[in-house]
Amino acid sequence: MARIFCIANQKGGVGKTTTTVNLAAGLARIGQRVLMVDLDPQGNATMGSGVDKRALEKTVYDVLLGEAEVAQARVDSEACGYQVLGANRELAGAEVELVDLPERERRLKQALAAVQQDYDFILIDCPPALSLLTLNGLCCAHGVIVPMQCEYFALEGLSDLVNTIRQVHANLNPELQIIGLLRVMFDPRITLQQQVSEQLKGHFGDKVFDTVIPRNVRLAEAPSYGLPGVVFDAGARGSQAFLAFAQEMVQRVQRMQ
Ligand code: ADP
Ligand code: MG
């Protein structure tokens, strides 16, 4: 049965999509069966997995509205070794259309239940908002992975997300927990980043993943080739870090059971 994780942080540009596609590719490389679900209308995780969002016949939008099964909408990312439930601009409309539907927060959960035995991991790339789409992700997840940059306002921004996760835990999904905080785009030469990193560990203890993802240009270049860094250049420092992170996730999941 797949373990389901949301990659969430309501801030944009913090590394959610980079984390999602590289973790998916890293897990695939160590033999895990992975489905990557793109819940962001920008479709970056779809394109970044080598899947053309404009060419998709069915997307997560159709799944959320009950117009397609996951099994009909998912596609193979052959280059990356995982499957993709993709998104494109159509998904922006779902926010409004879902409001009047029954079980509006649980529609993704219900849809994924049918394929959960096909995978070891289902990773959900969330949009940069605590919206109904993100709620759908949080409702079906066992855990949330929070990528964050070690910057001055990082801790402040985190409290909104932590509160939302608490509320979802209390009202909608008792299984939900923060599985961990992932330090991304890290530059150890910057003293402030080291200080914030220490603060994070002080505050969240072993919820902070051991793996640190460095700022690395190869990770930033990879999306323009439609690939995660781990596939584009496995030897790059950033890719190596994501491969280590995939191992760390497998170990965390073993401890969760
Ligand atoms: P989000 O999904 O949270 O909006 P992205 O994953 O799209 O964030 O990352 C934002 C930008 O930062 C992208 O251009 C991405 O390529 C770049 N980026 C992400 N992680 C790294 C990293 N570790 N090193 C260098 N660039 C990165
Ligand atoms: Mg993104």
Image (cartoon, rainbow, N blue to C red):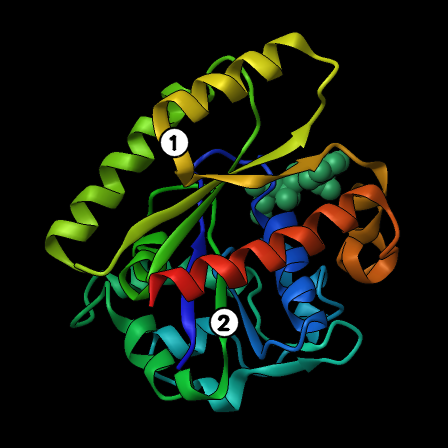
Find residue 254 and report its horizontal and vertical position in percent.
43, 66
Find residue 11 and report its horizontal and vertical position in percent.
48, 33
- Residue sitting at 80 percent across and 36 percent down? 216
Find residue 201 and report its horizontal and vertical position in percent.
44, 26
Q: Would you say residue 43 is visible in this rendering?
A: no
- Using the numbered discs, state the Cα–Cα distance from disc 2 to disc 1 in whole angstroms: 25 Å
Tell which circle, 2 or 1, labels the residue nearer the N-terminal end. 2
In the picture, measured across the screen, residue 118 lies left or right of residue 99, that is right
Q: Nearer the viewer, mark 2 or mark 1?
A: 1
Element at label 1: helix
Count how many numbered circles sit on residues in the image.
2
Three-letter code for the amino acid on which mark 1 is drawn: Gly
Other-residue count near label 2 (Cα within 10 Å), few / some / many at <14 / 14–19 / ≥20: many
Three-letter code for the amino acid on which mark 2 is drawn: Phe
The part of the image, by quadrant, that contains residue 103 is bottom left
In the picture, measured across the screen, residue 254 lies left or right of residue 35, that is left
- Residue sitting at 76 percent across and 80 percent down? 78
Decide: is 230 above or below 129. Answer: below
From the viewer's side, name the closer residue of 104 and 250.
250
Decide: is 176 above or below 215. Answer: below
From the viewer's side, name the closer residue of 221 and 55.
221
Find residue 91 and report its horizontal and vertical position in percent.
47, 63
Q: Which residue is mark 2?
A: 121
Q: Are marks 2 and 1 in contact (CB under 8 Å)?
A: no
Q: Which residue is mark 1?
A: 205
Other-residue count near label 1 (Cα within 10 Å), few / some / many at <14 / 14–19 / ≥20: few
Decide: is 134 above or below 47. Answer: above
